[in-house]
Amino acid sequence: MKMNISPAFKYQFSNFLKNAFVIYLIIIVIIAAFISISGNSKVSFTGYSLTATIFLFVMGIVNIRSDLRLCLQYGVSRRTSFISELLAVLSASAILAIAGELLTGTAQTLWADNSNLFVADIYQLIYVGAEAATLTFGQHVLSALVNTSLLFCACLFGMFFSLMFWRLNKVWTIIVAVSIPLLINIVPIILHRMGVNLNPLINWIDSAPFNFIMFFLLTAALFGIIDWLLLRKANIREAK
């Protein structure tokens, strides 16, 4: 079956882009505020990727249902809508990651001699070190790839929660909603008592940025498959 992805992609991508622009402006304002109040005190900002990750996680929860409803109203199939959503998420993740590198690189260059101001992101903190004042172009590229994989995975994880609750009735929705915070605390304890050692995996991810990228892309692929399985036979109901 031939898919006409372009119209659905343009609509979904524009939604992500408009909201991403707002978040990006907020982050710029926060960094500017840090710089203005730094004075002789030491100020650091290392939360760009964390902020962007939370943003795309929430967007994954919020957007998938409304985008699917609108696409179905205009005769776009579930498969086309889902694929275009994935492409929109990947594009938005890459743009946010690149924009983050521009922001971080600009701040590091302008205030490289200011020891009181430290601006960095997750790639630098894990693989380069906080002592580096600036990054090379190649390091910025790797940082953008690291953030893209993380943001893409976070959004598909958010979609999983949205689609899972969409498939559940009211009783199971309450049960699962109550169980999630309990499982978050109980599962690590159970794994520890079972003798499951996650240190080799953590050390493998920490050993190279490409391992980080591979891990989060594979995790995103897993959630993508689960999301599609939840979506393909979901009972599409109108928004309440």
Image (cartoon, grey):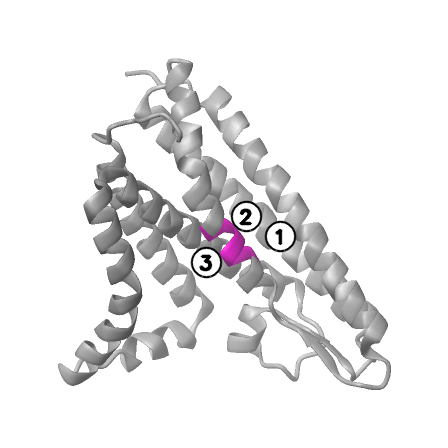
* Amino acid type shown at disc 3: Leu
Closer to the N terminus: mark 3 or mark 2? 2
Instruction: Pinpoint residue 55: horizontal percent, then vertical percent.
Output: 53, 52
The one of 23 and 223 positioned closer to us in this rendering: 23
Picture quadrant where residue 41 is located: bottom right
Q: Residue at left 41%, top 45%?
A: 61
User: What's the CA distance linking mark 3 and mark 2?
Assistant: 10 Å
Residues packed near mark 2 inside 10 Å, few (<14), some (14 to 19) or many (20 plus): many
Residue 121 counted in the magenta span: no
Q: Residue at left 82%, top 80%?
A: 114
Instruction: Pinpoint residue 180: horizontal percent, then vertical percent.
Output: 28, 61
The N terminus, quarter of image: top left
- Tell which tag, 1 or 3, sits nearer the viewer: 3
Instruction: Pinpoint residue 49: horizontal percent, then vertical percent.
Output: 56, 62
Residue 222 horizontal side relative to residue 45, left or right: left
Residue under pointer 3: 150
* Amino acid type shown at disc 1: Ile
Tell me the chief SS of the magenta region. Answer: helix
Residue 98 disc label: 1
Residue stretch in magenta: 52-57
Residues packed near mark 3 inside 10 Å, few (<14), some (14 to 19) or many (20 plus): many
Circles 3, 2 touching at the beta carbon (< 8 Å): no
Residue under pointer 2: 94
